[in-house]
């Protein structure tokens, strides 16, 4: 497999002239990224389709609104200061086919269930954020994929091409960006309905969790569930306003990988005059695209959204400080989140010098653990997988490092689903390799299933309750 080359951003300024209708085209420096090296971008098969797609995206309504983004930044600022905890979860790579009401509701339901447990364990508000309504693009280690002597472009997510291994499916089709927009819009519409229409009622979510602990495999968590039950009963006895607890805030996030799409959905906020990327509330830069002088870091440094950066095991403290200087020069709490993905065997050694250096600088970043990406292995029968014990060990290591340094472990970022898939090994109700043949569904990376996700939440709640 060959590594992806680094190239200059394509000159698509003519197509982006349409963005002037949103007031974003003339904002100083917003298109500086076009002159910089850029990784992980498609080679669109039809320039005319690309131009038409970008032009339409630039005048479509925003998917999220600047005021919602500002609220999230305030919530993340609280988490950076130890007054809240972030739960961020969802698919590795969303697909258009899976954007059904049942699939979306099961993911939202699982995140809500996890959040109730974490809220009780932390005695803090939990910020609920989905890797949803935009997680359609994926970085790849190679431009191509070869099967049985046939070489085709690698699958880069539904926003770029199809998963089916045919020349037609694997062509980079810019028209898919429009389908990604409309799929995201319908997903957000359903999420808003679920989280404001009674689906998120605290009492209902807790009843779902009682069903989880009724499974003999999860009996060890029954004590915590009973504690939560008593707390809810106490609240009811005191006349707590449960009508208010039927609604929750729920934010969307995705990796800002496909800059043509992100730039086309950037708008100037009429209140503040600043640019907001209205494709999502929260955007992150991946481990493969966080080069300081490259396009992704430059573009995201210029939008007002809260930004995350994935930090792998090769990251140094100086790397982190340079990213802070570029992405958060004003040291604004809530602006920058560092999502560490070290691997269970490396986090206790590699994370402390980074945290120490950032803390000494006075920057108030939010520290979040991604215990998934550093623990990927291949099963004996050839499936990409992760072991639940490794995932949990990295979470424990993350908490141990922050406890030793007196800093706050502010969040959890996981690839998960609300479905009964078999993609990660282990758990109290264990998944083994034999189950992969019938229940492995991910088109990219393995996810925790519904039960594994809830088990992780109960275990993390235990760590939070000890702080």
Image: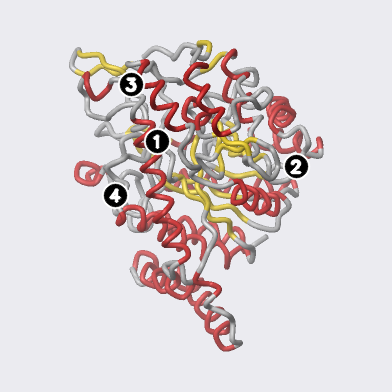
> Foreground: 260 or 212?
260
Relative height, residue 385 to residue 252 (above, below): above
As measured in the structure, the alpha-carbon distance from the residue carrying label 4 to the one carrying label 1 is 20 Å
Query: Distance between the Cα atoms at labels 3 and 2?
Result: 38 Å
- For mark 1, what is the residue? 136
Q: Position of residue 54 (x, y in %)?
A: 44, 26
User: In this rendering, does residue 143 appear at all?
Assistant: no
Quarter of the image where one finds residue 164: top left
| Location of residue 291 (image quadrant) | top right
| Residue appearing at x 48%, y 42% in the figure | 61
Q: Nearer the viewer, residue 48 or 210?
A: 48
Residue 190, horizontal then vertical, whole percent:
39, 56
**Residue ID for mark 2:** 332
Side of 358 where 344 appears, left or right: left
Which residue in the structure is indicated by mark 4?
421
Secondary structure at numbered mark 1: loop
Among numbered discs 4 and 1, the one appearing first in the sequence: 1
């Amino acid at each position: 497999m060959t590594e992806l080359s680094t190239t200059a951003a394509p000159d698509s300024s003519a197509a982006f002239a349409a963005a002037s209708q949103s007031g974003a085209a003339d904002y100083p420096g917003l298109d500086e990224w076009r002159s910089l090296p850029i990784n992980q971008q498609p080679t669109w098969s039809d320039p005319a389709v690309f131009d038409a797609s970008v032009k339409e995206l630039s005048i479509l309504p925003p998917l999220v609104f600047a005021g919602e983004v500002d609220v999230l930044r305030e919530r993340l600022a609280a988490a950076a200061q130890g007054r809240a905890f972030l739960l961020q979860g969802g698919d590795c790579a969303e697909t258009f086919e899976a954007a059904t009401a049942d699939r979306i509701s099961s993911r939202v339901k699982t995140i809500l269930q996890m959040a109730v447990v974490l809220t009780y364990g932390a005695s803090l508000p939990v910020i609920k954020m989905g890797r949803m309504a935009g997680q359609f693009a994926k970085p790849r280690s190679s431009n191509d994929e070869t099967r049985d002597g046939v070489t085709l472009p690698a699958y880069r997510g539904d926003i770029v091409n199809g998963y089916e291994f045919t020349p037609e499916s694997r062509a980079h089709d810019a028209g898919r960006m429009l389908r990604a927009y409309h799929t995201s819009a319908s997903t957000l519409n359903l999420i808003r309905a679920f989280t404001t229409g009674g689906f998120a009622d605290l009492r209902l979510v807790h009843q779902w969790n009682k069903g989880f602990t009724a499974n003999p495999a999860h009996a060890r968590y029954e004590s915590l569930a009973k504690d939560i039950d008593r707390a809810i009963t106490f609240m009811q006895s005191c006349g707590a306003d449960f009508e208010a607890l039927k609604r929750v805030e729920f934010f969307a996030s995705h990796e800002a990988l496909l800059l043509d799409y992100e730039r086309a959905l950037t708008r100037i906020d009429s209140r503040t005059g600043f640019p907001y990327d209205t494709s999502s509330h929260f955007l992150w830069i991946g481990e493969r695209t966080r080069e300081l002088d490259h396009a992704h870091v430059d573009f995201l440094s210029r939008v007002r959204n809260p930004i995350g950066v994935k930090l792998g095991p090769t990251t140094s403290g100086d790397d982190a400080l340079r990213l802070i200087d570029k992405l958060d020069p004003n040291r604004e709490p809530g602006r920058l989140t560092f999502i560490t993905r070290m691997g269970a065997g490396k986090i206790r050694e590699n994370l402390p010098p980074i945290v120490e250096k950032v803390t000494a600088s006075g920057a108030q970043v939010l520290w979040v653990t991604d215990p998934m990406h550093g623990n990927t292995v291949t099963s004996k029968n050839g499936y990409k997988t992760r072991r639940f014990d490794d995932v949990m060990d990295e979470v424990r290591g993350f908490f141990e490092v922050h406890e030793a340094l007196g800093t706050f472990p502010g969040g959890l970022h996981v690839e998960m689903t609300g479905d009964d898939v078999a993609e990660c090994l282990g758990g109290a109700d264990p998944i083994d390799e034999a189950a992969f043949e019938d229940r492995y569904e991910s088109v990219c990376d393995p996810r925790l299933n519904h039960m594994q996700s809830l088990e992780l939440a109960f275990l993390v709640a235990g760590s939070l309750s000890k702080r």
